[in-house]
Image (spheres, helix red, strand yellow):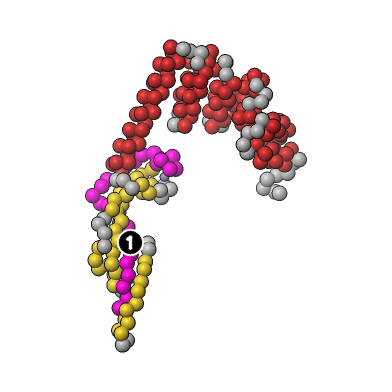
Amino acid sequence: MKRAHRRFGRRGFILLFGSRTIIRNDPSVAPVQTVCPRCGQQAQMVGKTYRHWFTIFFIPIIPMSRANSFTQCSRCGAQFPVTPEQLSSRLSQSETQQSQEAIGLYNSLRASPANSVTLNQLMTMYASMKEYDQAISAAADFPQALHNSEQCMTTLGRVYLAKNDLDNALQWFDAATNRNAHLGEAQYYKAVAHLMRTPPAADKAVAAARAARSAGYSNADALLRDAEAKARGEDASGG
Ligand SMILES: [Zn+2]
């Protein structure tokens, strides 16, 4: 809430006026349950309004603007300059668009099942929608495209990594680096997966992070320092 005040004084009589913004829940619109575009969680999206008021002694007297609608996520507090209904209809539009794109990519893969570029696009799209199982079954549907390409193997490994399935993730990162040891992305996430193991496989992580760094992969330097600290037996929390 923003406040601005000015004093107007004459012979002991002081008039204190200013302005403030008042935010209210909008009772005319029903909250909507949807996945928040910012925090990515199922959340209640609540319709609200804000309005600027002229105040005297902090009491809002005259509205200086009309009431503007917006929507707020009840989980993370993100605000969107549309009503809850508009927000959810835009979100479902973009979802429909993405699933149509996925169908298009599937059809194009059926026509040329060895096309690794398309398979990689499809898996990346599913991963961005957090549809990890869809990405995995796409890879299973087009084994030729998968086995032709260390990039597809890396993407599949990252999908498994996102699911916390370290065994499968490492299997695909290994397959990728066996084909091409200079693929920085595969080496980088291989190191990440080794570090995620309990206990961390620090030596293997160091080797992979070093390979990622010499391939010029961004942030590999920081990861390597992390892995080396673990390999020396330093606990990040203990210093
Ligand atoms: Zn949120």
Q: Write the residue at 54% across / 24% down.
A: 156
133 is higher (above) or lower (below) than 84: above
149 is higher (above) or lower (below) than 87: above
What percent of the width, then of the height, locates residue 170? Answer: 62, 26
* Residue position marked by numbered label 1 in the rendering: 21
Relative to the observer, which residue lies in front, 67 or 227? 67
Question: For the magenta stretch, what is the residue range?
Answer: 15-42
Can you tell me which quadrant of the image ligand 1 is in?
top left
Q: Write the residue at 36% across / 47% down.
A: 80
Give the structural element (helix, strand or loop) at label 1: strand
Residue 176 colored magenta?
no
What percent of the width, then of the height, locates residue 24? Answer: 30, 56
Give the quarter of the image for residue 223. Answer: top right
Q: Quadrant of the N terminus?
A: bottom left
Q: Residues within 10 Å of mark 1 (few under 14, many from 20)?
A: some
Q: Is residue 101 left or right of residue 51?
A: right
What percent of the width, then of the height, locates residue 135? Answer: 48, 24
